[in-house]
Image: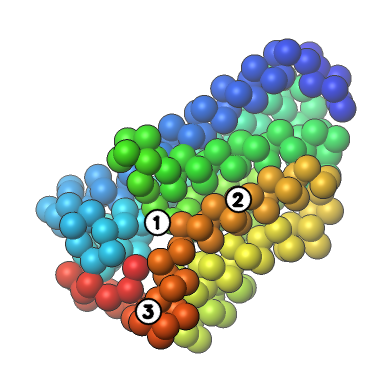
Amino acid sequence: MGQVGSPDALSILLLVASCVIAYFVCGIPSGLLLAERIGKVDVRTQGSGNVGSTNVARSAGKLAGGLTLLCDTLKAYVSVLVGFLLVGVVGIGDVSAVKPGGALDWMMALVYLFCIVGHVFTPYLRFKGGKGIAVGFGGALALMPLTGLSLLVPFLLLAVTTKRVSAGSITAAVALPFLAWAIERPSAPFLAIVACVAAVVVFAHRKNIVKLAHGEEKPFSFKRGDKRGA
């Protein structure tokens, strides 16, 4: 087993395996599959063309959207837990060492990043996926529960007041590293990786940012087939 502060070859190998698992599991396009199954539509040709829960809800209905949200959240949550098992238990032999604030907390932050990258740049859809919000929330709940729950505050505050999911999503992403720092007090490498998570999510919302800046982002609607928003 690797010693705390100095991961050995086995721990690094298990970290790589955990990242690969996170990438391919979180890359599964839940929204596309559920929209086809429940709504009989290819969500990529509807609304914004995004496979995330917001566009799925618009294009295939609330049931498909809700299930997409649940699946995207759970696949990241489970992927991070698998990382804790492989890296923390099997590899390091001390789960606390890879939790936020631990000597090797950056290792699990890396697994978290691969959850987001897998979802946003899914290998199953030519590297075009969702926008990382549900996956980011699920991964955060497993990695740092208090921080994950705290993300609901900026998200709901902006989403409810503006009636635009994208505004809440972008705000929550930007708040992520700051909340992680304030609540978890992790290492600098951990924060740097979490900042990368936030950057990937913001990048995935780049079109929404342009629409918001020009006042063109429409409010969210559950009306099926609604092509508003993103």
Q: At x 71% / y 33%, what residue is drawn?
A: 107
Spatial CA distance of label 2 from label 3 is: 24 Å
The secondary structure type at the circle numbered 2 is helix
Spatial CA distance of label 3 from label 1 is: 21 Å
Residue 67 visible, this orientation: no
Residue located beneath label 2 in the image: 197
Q: Quick one: label 1, few (<14), some, or many (20+) residues within 10 Å?
A: many
Residue located beneath label 3 in the image: 217
> Which amino acid does the dot numbered 2 rest on?
Val
The secondary structure type at the circle numbered 1 is helix
- Tell me the tag on residue 220: none
Q: Quick one: label 2, few (<14), some, or many (20+) residues within 10 Å?
A: many
Pointer 3 or 1: first along the chain: 1
Q: Is residue 202 above or below residue 116?
A: below
Closer to viewer: mark 3 or mark 1: 3
> Which amino acid does the dot numbered 3 rest on?
Glu
Residue 221 visible, this orientation: yes
| Residue nearest the viewer, comparing 51 with 100 | 51
Residues marked 2 and 3 touching at CB (< 8 Å): no
Pointer 2 or 1: first along the chain: 1
Residue located beneath label 1 in the image: 69
Q: At x 31% / y 57%, what residue is drawn?
A: 50
Outermost residue to the left: 40
Closer to viewer: mark 2 or mark 1: 2
Whole-percent x, y for residue 133 in the image: 49, 58
Split into 4 quadrants, where in the image is the N terminus? top right
Q: At x 23% / y 54%, what residue is drawn?
A: 44
Pointer 2 or 3: first along the chain: 2
> Which amino acid does the dot numbered 1 rest on?
Leu
